[in-house]
Image (cartoon, helix red, strand yellow):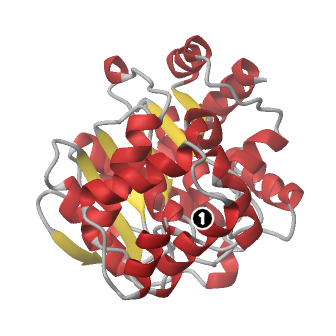
């Protein structure tokens, strides 16, 4: 590790195989906490290179507990986190709306690191217990249309890194990796990222796969479609800038998306939205992300996707999916 750190300090970069090997060796416990903290801190001070991101992704997928969900034609709906915006759980809510619309979802998530309430925090609040038991995971996917893979259980090799990430309490390159290392390797995915640079890196990597994907970044910094302004959408066909109007929705204010100061407050927003008791702004943000996810999964225009998402939410199908999910995972 000393040689690697010295090279990185000299502003050199690692190739794909070196990056993969370093992460594998971290997983094997070959480095101490100080060395690992120094390693991730370097990537807080300079941009990660494409080959490094690919190598880290390769290592995580090699070491994960795999999930075979191809038969369900499932998708993931997630964000990288790390945008520092402290919004309510938009992507997690969107996942249940997508599931309610009939599109199976293999959701990959974790506790919040740079935010108060990540997907794991809010689901755990409602009684969800996490497991990497494949039978339980598949039963949940089949019966409720959605399963949840709590990242630490499906990436047990990263346990040595967990204390470092928790103590740092800020985004690291692991935030960049999260959506790329879903153990189910879904063929469909909507990914929200916290920067345009990362959006383009994801686009380059995903365009060299057979994945149906949409990568979104709000131009004012959100790692999701915030409706607070325009957002970039990258898919196989093009790279475009869209506005709330393009989705048939209206512009929101940042304060409309506040997630609360505690997990309990975030959970209250979550429950209200699913029960059609949320604010119009909260509902709109969820419909935007769920709608674009459905458009990506089914080759539809975004406005049609939003209409399907609205039907899922207003009909109670999204809530039904959520209740069934909690029943099966408690």
Image height of 167 relative to 163, above or below: below
User: Looking at the picture, how far across and down is residue 86, in whole percent?
Assistant: 69, 73
Q: Nearer the viewer, residue 301 or 202?
A: 202
Residue visible at 50% across and 34% down in the picture? 99
Q: Nearer the viewer, residue 75 or 94?
A: 75
The answer to whether any part of residue 312 appears in the image is yes
**Image position of 321 (left or right of 111):** left
The answer to whether any part of residue 291 appears in the image is no
User: Looking at the picture, how far across and down is residue 153, in whole percent?
Assistant: 63, 34
Label 1 sits on a secondary structure element that is: helix
For label 1, the residue is 36
Q: Nearer the viewer, residue 277 or 326?
A: 326
Residue visible at 52% across and 63% down in the picture? 175
Residue visible at 49% across and 87% down in the picture? 45
Residue 115 occupies which quadrant of the picture? bottom right
Number of other residues with Cα within 10 Å of mark 1, as a class: few under 14, some 14 to 19, many 20 or more: many
Image height of 303 relative to 96, above or below: below
Residue visible at 64% across and 41% down in the picture? 152
Q: Nearer the viewer, residue 207 or 166?
A: 166
User: Looking at the picture, how far across and down is residue 306, in whole percent?
Assistant: 40, 54
**Image position of 74 (left or right of 252):** left
Image height of 77 relative to 282, above or below: above
Image height of 20 relative to 8, above or below: above
């Amino acid at each position: 590790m000393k040689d690697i750190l010295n090279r990185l300090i000299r502003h050199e970069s690692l190739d794909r195989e070196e990056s993969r090997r370093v992460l594998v060796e971290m997983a094997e416990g070959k480095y101490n906490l100080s060395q690992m903290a120094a390693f991730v801190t370097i990537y807080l001070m300079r941009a990660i290179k494409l080959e490094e991101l690919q190598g880290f992704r390769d290592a995580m997928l090699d070491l994960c507990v795999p999930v075979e969900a191809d038969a369900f034609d499932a998708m993931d709906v997630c964000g990288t986190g790390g945008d520092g915006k402290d919004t309510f759980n938009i992507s997690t809510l969107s996942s249940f709306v997508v599931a309610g619309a009939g599109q199976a979802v293999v959701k990959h998530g974790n506790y919040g690191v740079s935010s108060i309430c990540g997907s794991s925090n809010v689901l755990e609040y409602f009684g969800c217990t996490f497991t990497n038991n494949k039978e339980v995971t598949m039963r949940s996917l089949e019966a409720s249309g959605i399963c949840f893979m709590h990242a630490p259980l499906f990436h047990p090799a990263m346990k040595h890194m967990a204390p470092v990430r928790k103590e740092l309490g800020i985004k690291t390159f692991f935030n960049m990796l999260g959506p790329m290392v879903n153990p189910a390797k879904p063929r469909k995915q909507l990914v929200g990222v916290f920067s345009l640079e990362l959006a383009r890196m994801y686009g380059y990597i995903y365009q060299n796969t057979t994945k149906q994907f949409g990568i979104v970044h709000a131009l004012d910094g959100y790692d999701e479609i915030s409706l607070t302004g325009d957002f970039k959408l990258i898919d196989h066909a093009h790279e475009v800038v869209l506005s709330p109007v393009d989705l048939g929705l209206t512009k929101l204010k940042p304060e409309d998306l506040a997630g609360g100061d505690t997990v309990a407050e975030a959970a209250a927003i979550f429950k209200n939205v699913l029960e059609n008791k949320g604010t119009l702004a909260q509902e709109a943000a969820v419909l935007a992300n769920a709608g674009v996810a459905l458009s990506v999964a089914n080759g539809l225009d975004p406005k049609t996707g939003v209409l399907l998402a609205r039907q899922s939410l207003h009909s109670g199908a999204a809530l039904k999916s959520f209740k069934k999910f909690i029943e099966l995972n408690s």
